[in-house]
Image: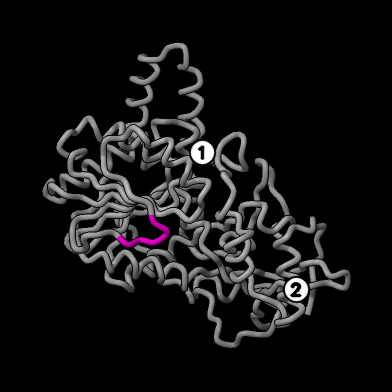
Amino acid sequence: MTATPTAQSPTPLAEQLAARIELEGPITVGAYMQACLHDPVHGYYRKRAAIGRAGDFITAPEISQVFGELIGLWCAVVWRQMGEPGFLHLVELGPGRGTLMRDLLRAARTVPAFADALHVHLVETNASLEAEQRATLDEEDVPITWSGELDVEPAGVPTIVVGNEFLDTLPIAQWVFHAGQWCTRCIGLDAQGRLAFLNGPGDPELRPPQAIAATAREGDVFETRTPAFNFWAEKLAALDGPLAALFIDYGHNTPVFGDTLQAVRAHRYHNPLDTPGEADLTAQVDFAAAVAAMRRHSLVCDGPAPQAEFLGVLGIAARGSRLMAANPAKAGEIEAGIARLMAPGGMGTRFKALGVRSTRQAPLPGLAQVDMDEPGP
């Protein structure tokens, strides 16, 4: 086995994981990511209010209110496509501080019948963030419920699901190409008892996508999220009613080799094995794999489209101009926020919007269907 050591801080979760590894042996990258983010006591998403300038990272809704407002108008258009039902579940997965939902509902009020139909469900596992969401949304006049699961009631009614920077937090599996075969990438302990990446046992069943399989070189890393994507595709399909979902995240449309696991703390990148439980862990989204999972569960996908293209179609320039005219003292701040969301080579192209819908739902606004190759496992 080959180990890559890191400089680490002895967090409670690091000590817990070290004890687990000493007892049970190396763990997979997915198991490590799951523990770091969701451990009941020390998991990052269980306790930290991480979003915002005082936290560890900033998401699109925190950059500009226009982002959430446009998503709200997108939802209103989809509601009309659904036949303007009088009862609609609106679900947000990983709702952060409630900023996106607050801005979404502000826009929703411009379509009163749509706003009246809404029953909002926030899927959140972080108690600190839930408290912030409740404070942010305290004065909203729509019914809002919180849960750690996607379990809306009643079932079988029209549902719109929104997930901004949700897919990138799902656990990944990694393999390393070593000595002519793919080896499971694991996390164990080095000679000093520190967490370290290891090349684990070979996996003869692994078949990377045909488009890149023949290009593998010593040390290449291949990532998948197939179990996690299948889990959420099954959850969406089980809603058993007219469905439209919108996921916005950073990633790639075609399969690639590369280690994209990253940790962020206080707006700085860290080695993923440093301070486990105290830093956010994410990895790029393989949108081809996400689309394949949705299709396996009889769902239809539109996109993915670059974020700049998607927001452009929704009218971000016009909305930004109106907002700047109404708030001239903040015009520079508003313009800078929109520019950041649309930046070529930055959020505008690195982030992409993917639509998911039930088979009878009309194509989703702002997104076109894209033919994508079937990925590997």
> Could one spot residue 257 in this view of the protein?
no
Q: Secondary structure at mark 2?
A: helix
Question: Which residue does the numbered mark 1 point to in the structure image?
Answer: 344
- Asked whether, in this view, residue 351 is left or right of residue 312, the answer is right
Query: Which residue in the structure is indicated by mark 2?
Result: 19
Amino acid carrying label 2: it is Ala
The residue under the point 27% across, 44% down is 143
What's the magenta bit mostly, secondary-structure-wise? Answer: loop
How many residues crowd mark 2 within 10 Å: few (<14), some (14–19), many (20+)?
Answer: some
**Residue 98 location (% of width, % of height):** 42, 40
Q: Where on the picture, by quarter, is residue 266?
A: top right
Residue 200's place in the image compared with 285, above or below, is below
Q: Is residue 320 something that shows in the picture?
A: yes
Please give the range of residues in magenta.
147-151
Q: Residue at x 50, y 18 (%)?
A: 332
The residue lying toward the viewer, choosing from 100 and 3, is 100
